[in-house]
Image (cartoon, helix red, strand yellow):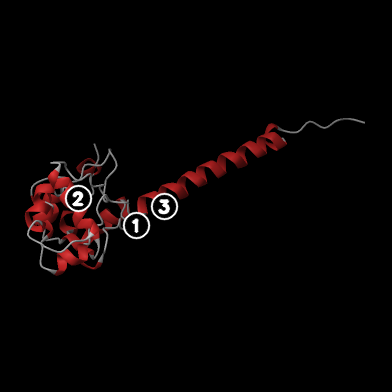
Amino acid sequence: MEERKLAWWQRPIVRIGIAIGLLVILGGAVGGVYYTQTPPEQPIAFPHSTHVGIGAQCLYCHPGAATGPVAGLPPTELCWGCHQQIQRQTPELDKLASFARSNEQIPWVPVAEEPDFVHFNHRPHIAAGLNCEDCHGDVGNMQVAEPQAGQNMGWCLSCHQEMAPEQWTRLSDCSLCHY
């Protein structure tokens, strides 16, 4: 009886290897989406809804958004400047007081971060009249700031095309946002 030779792609070991490779890639993609869409745990549970509800403006805590690429995270001194006057005791205010007493910065974990190959600047977006909520969602109703689903290059390009069709050629130039 003559033994038939299988082509390399028909061999069971090759097929198993391909299946394992595809599972690893799929698992990495699912994990990446999950971790980029899940709000990170913060050192202090900061209720955005409370602060926005009393009239605090985004730029008060995140002044860098008006002038440059990074909005910035509030330093301990800024938070403590208001909260040292509040007599109410809560576990979160106790944490803030502890950071202030020890002269330590609160190790906030950024929620909205761009990949290293993306050059983003808040300044032109604010100058164009966009509000923080246009990109970051209704933060005023969030207990904790959350990454916005679908915030990717296609999302940015469709906004550029919709907001400024007369400038589409310039706003769709790859070098505008990528190094």
- Left/right placement of residue 83 relative to residue 22 reads left
The amino acid at mark 1 is Gly
Q: Give me the residue at 36% from left, 54% from top.
A: 37
User: How many neighbours does mark 2 have within 10 angstroms: few (below 14), some (14-19), or many (20 or more)?
Assistant: some
Q: Which residue is mark 3?
A: 34
Q: Give me the residue at 21% from left, 66% from top.
A: 49
Which of the pair 128/173 is nearer the observer?
A: 128
Q: Nearer the viewer, mark 3 or mark 2?
A: 3
Quarter-wise, where is residue 137 in the image?
Answer: bottom left
Which of the pair 137/95 is nearer the observer?
A: 95
N-terminal-most mark, 2 or 1 = 1
* Residue 173 to residue 11: above or below: below
Which of the pair 157/69 is nearer the observer?
A: 69
The amino acid at mark 3 is Tyr
Q: Which residue is mark 2?
A: 171
Q: Which residue is mark 1?
A: 150
N-terminal-most mark, 3 or 2 = 3
Question: For numbered disc 2, what is the local secondary structure?
Answer: helix
Q: CA distance from mark 1 to mark 3?
A: 12 Å
The amino acid at mark 2 is Leu
